């Protein structure tokens, strides 16, 4: 796609460094084809130094005699939803408290993990750490990518599907040692029911709905 104009970087600074996320602030001007420039404007976005991108993993099996496809979902702690959406500031008509969030398995592609082989291995590692499921890299299928929020982060999601042996159960997930993973639980849901719950607002994680719908399309 041809750029409609260029960008002149006036300044580039880091705000709030030292934690898990960093805010990068650019002061920019649009440089138009005729050479004129826009007013100066500020663009803030979030960077994650541990790794920019993440894998999103749909673990599935055929779990019943009828061959119904089931998917594994995980209920885990998400402090940003709990503290970032207080009821006195952001009304929630349904009255639900977002302490735990239902999602599929996901994890950061760490610095230095580059290429398809590394993406597959990261998906294998996350499936074991977060779900207690053992898979091989060659058992996984890539289902494309997506930028979840390009207005505030350069993060890209790499969607991966992995079939678990039919009727098998996951082992207790070992986790990665992070306190944020304490108390997380996993469960299997029929794929169609999981998608229905997404549409009904019972499962609200966008990446989860997107990968489940891609999996549904892939399986036909």
Image (cartoon, rainbow, N blue to C red):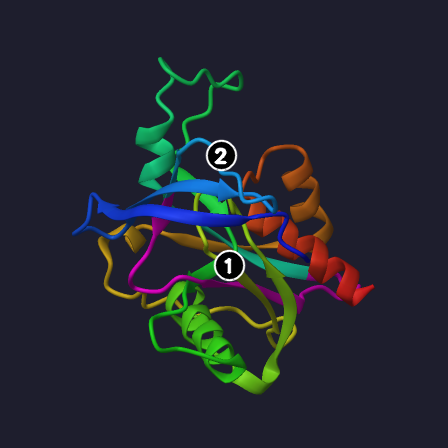
**Residue sitting farthest toward the top:** 88
Which residue has dot 2 on it?
Answer: 38
Query: Given the current orientation, which residue lies at the most extreme right position?
Result: 220
Where does residue 60 sit, x and y in percent of width and height? 63, 66
Q: Is residue 216 above or below residue 83?
A: below
Disc 1 is placed on an element classified as loop
Seen in the picture, residue 183 relative to 168 is either above or below; the reply is above
The location of residue 176, given as percent across then percent down, is: 29, 66
Please, is residue 184 above or below residue 151 in the view?
below
Count of marks placed on residues:
2
Q: Residue at x 52, y 69 (%)?
A: 169
Camera-nearest residue between 73 and 26? 26
* Residue 51 shows up from this direction: yes
Q: Quadrant of residue 34?
A: top right
The residue singled out by tag 1 in the image is 156
Give the extent of the magenta segment.
45-69
């Amino acid at each position: 796609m041809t750029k409609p104009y260029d960008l002149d970087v006036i300044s580039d600074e880091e705000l709030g460094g030292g934690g898990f996320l960093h805010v990068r602030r650019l002061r920019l001007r649009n440089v138009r084809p005729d050479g004129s420039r826009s007013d100066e404007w500020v663009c803030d976005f979030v960077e994650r130094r541990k790794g920019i991108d993440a894998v999103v993993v749909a673990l599935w099996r055929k779990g019943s005699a009828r061959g119904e496809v089931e998917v594994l979902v995980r209920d885990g702690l998400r402090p940003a939803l709990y503290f970032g959406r207080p009821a006195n500031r952001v009304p929630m008509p349904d009255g639900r408290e977002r302490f735990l969030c239902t999602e599929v398995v996901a994890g950061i592609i760490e610095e230095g993990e580059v290429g398809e082989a590394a993406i597959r291995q990261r998906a294998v590692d996350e499936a074991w750490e977060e779900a207690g499921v053992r898979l091989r890299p060659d058992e996984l299928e890539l289902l494309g990518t997506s930028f979840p929020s390009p207005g505030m982060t350069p993060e890209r999601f790499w969607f991966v599907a992995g079939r678990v042996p039919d009727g098998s159960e996951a082992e207790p997930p070992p986790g990665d040692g992070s306190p944020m993973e304490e108390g997380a639980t996993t469960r299997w849901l029929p794929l169609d029911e999981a998608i229905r719950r997404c549409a009904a607002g019972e499962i609200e994680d966008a990446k989860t709905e997107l990968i489940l719908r891609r999996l549904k399309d892939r399986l036909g």
